[in-house]
Amino acid sequence: MSLPRRAFFSTCVAASAATVVPANAEGTAAATPLPPRLEQGLLFSCKYGMTKGASLDERLAAAREAGMDGVDFDAAASVTPEQLRQAATRTGVFIHNAINHSHWQQRLTSADTATRATALENLKHCIRVSHAAGGSAVLLVIGSSADGPDGP
């Protein structure tokens, strides 16, 4: 039996959303930086990986000092939700999303069941990280045409 692509993606999204732990269970009740006000019509952000510094706090502060309104966090695998929440609170930097750290290596469209399971766990982690830091999104590349029936 073949599962239509839309049904597959809908199932993945529903499963991911259903597994997100409520904020208070992750210890995220403390205030995180609020999204910047859109006064000038544009908001500026950079990827966390574009910043320099020895620590998470130094790198977030560098983005703020460079005039960024927020950060796209592309190192979700390196932190726990609580670590990023605390760093965002300490530095006052708004983390508006997490970028899935392994969406090209472990894809939701892989033919391998174990790879898909790993991809789902990575997505869940990114959702928790983004939510804990006050973000509202996760960047995810769902799959690759190489995973289709005809291959690359």
Image (spheres, helix red, strand yellow):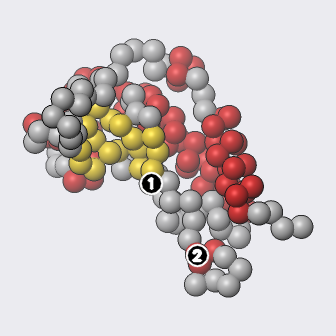
State the image coordinates of residue 92 (x, y, percent, origin top left).
23, 25
Of the pair 116 and 83, the residue shown nearer to us? 116
Distance from Cα at disc 1 to Cα at disc 2: 19 Å
Query: Is 4 left, or right, of 138 in this rendering?
Result: right
Specify which label sits upstream in the sequence, 1 or 2. Answer: 1
Amino acid at the residue labelled 1: His
Residue 101 is labelled as 1
Say few, some or many: other residues with alpha carbon within 10 Å of mark 2 (under 14 / 14 to 19 / 20 or more). few
Mark number for residue 3?
none
- 121 on left or right of 87: right
Residue 114 shows in the view: no
* Quarter occupied by residue 5: bottom right
Q: Residue at x 49, y 65 (%)?
A: 104
- Residue 23 as seen in the image, left or right of residue 42: right
Mark 1 lies on a secondary structure that is loop
Q: Amino acid at mark 2?
A: Ser
Position of 27 relative to 42 (above/below):
above
Measured along the vertical axis of the image, is residue 137 above or below residue 24?
below
Farthest-out residue, front: 41
The answer to whether residue 18 is above or below residue 5 is above
Q: Look at the image and tell me in which quarter the N terminus lies.
A: bottom right
Extreme residue in the right direction: 1
Secondary structure under badge 2? helix
Crowding at mark 1 (Cα within 10 Å: few <14, some 14-19, many 20+): many
The x and y percentages for residue 122 are 55, 49
Residue, x 45% and y 50% (percent of image)?
139
**1 and 2 marks in contact (CB < 8 Å):** no
Please report the residue visible at 63 percent of the width from the left and 60 percent of the height from the top. 108
According to the picture, the residue beneath numbered tag 2 turns out to be 145
Front position in the image: 2 or 25: 2
